[in-house]
Image (tube, grey):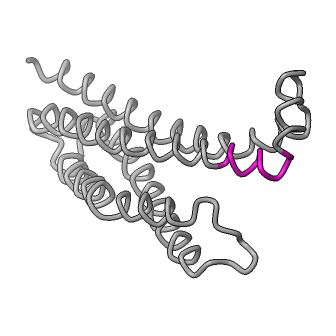
Amino acid sequence: MELRSARTWAIFCMAVWLTGTVSTAVVATQNFYTIDRLLDAQPNPAFHSAVERLGRDSMREVLRYLSSELNRLYFQYWNLAQLAVGILALWLVVKLPDANRSKWTIVAMLATVLFMTVVITPAILSVGRAIDFVPRDPPPPELRTFGLLHAAYTVLDGVLLILGVLVTLWLQKKND
């Protein structure tokens, strides 16, 4: 593979990685915001009837549970996809003689994703499922743990995003 092609494909991989990171964050937050929008608007007569039968609070709890499970699934899949895209990007960048900084930054990004995949995500899943359908008044002690894990994941995701942007810029400059 010629160097120009390797660089182009590496930039493409970084674009996929960055797009997936932003998209996953948007989808995860919108899953929860959509619940309240739907409950407020009740745009469909069958949905309105279901809310009336179950009650707004119970319906909200069920929909939040569904959103939580979907987000858990999305983040597990996204973690694995990041590893695949990151390994491919690294394989391409290693071929470039002038991309040492990009190479080591991608290695750091992969290590971070691996940590998120093996340590943080399983803990979030476990603690999150433990607090599903648990009353929030008073807040259960696990809620603090969940908040800290979620904050750690979010911060690491933000770091990955910043590093990914830097790698992409360095690769475009052709001399890092």
Vertical comparison of 28 with 151: above or below: above
Please name whichever residue, 42 or 52, is drawn nearer the observer in this view of the structure.
Answer: 52
Q: In which quarter of the image is the N terminus?
A: top left
| Residue 175 located within the stretch drawn in magenta | no
Q: Residue at left 82%, top 53%?
A: 57
- Residue at the farthest front position: 53
Q: Is the magenta stretch mostly helix, strand or loop?
A: helix
Q: Residue at left 86%, top 38%?
A: 53
Please name whichever residue, 82 or 88, is drawn nearer the observer in this view of the structure.
Answer: 82
What segment is highlighted magenta in the picture?
Answer: 55-64
| Residue 63 located within the stretch drawn in magenta | yes
Vertical comparison of 45 with 120: above or below: above
Vertical comparison of 44 with 58: above or below: above
Q: Residue at left 52%, top 45%?
A: 69
| Whole-percent x, y for residue 162 in the image | 44, 52
Q: Residue at left 45%, top 39%?
A: 74
Q: Which image quadrant is residue 123 in?
A: bottom left
Q: Is residue 93 left or right of residue 135?
A: left
Q: Is residue 32 left or right of residue 168?
A: right
Q: In this view, does 139 lie to the left or right of 176?
A: right
| Whole-percent x, y for residue 96 in the image | 12, 34
In this rendering, the count of numbered labels is 0
Please name whichever residue, 175 or 144, is drawn nearer the observer in this view of the structure.
Answer: 144
| Whole-percent x, y for residue 156 in the image | 42, 61
| Whole-percent x, y for residue 164 in the image | 37, 45
Q: Is residue 131 left or right of residue 96?
A: right
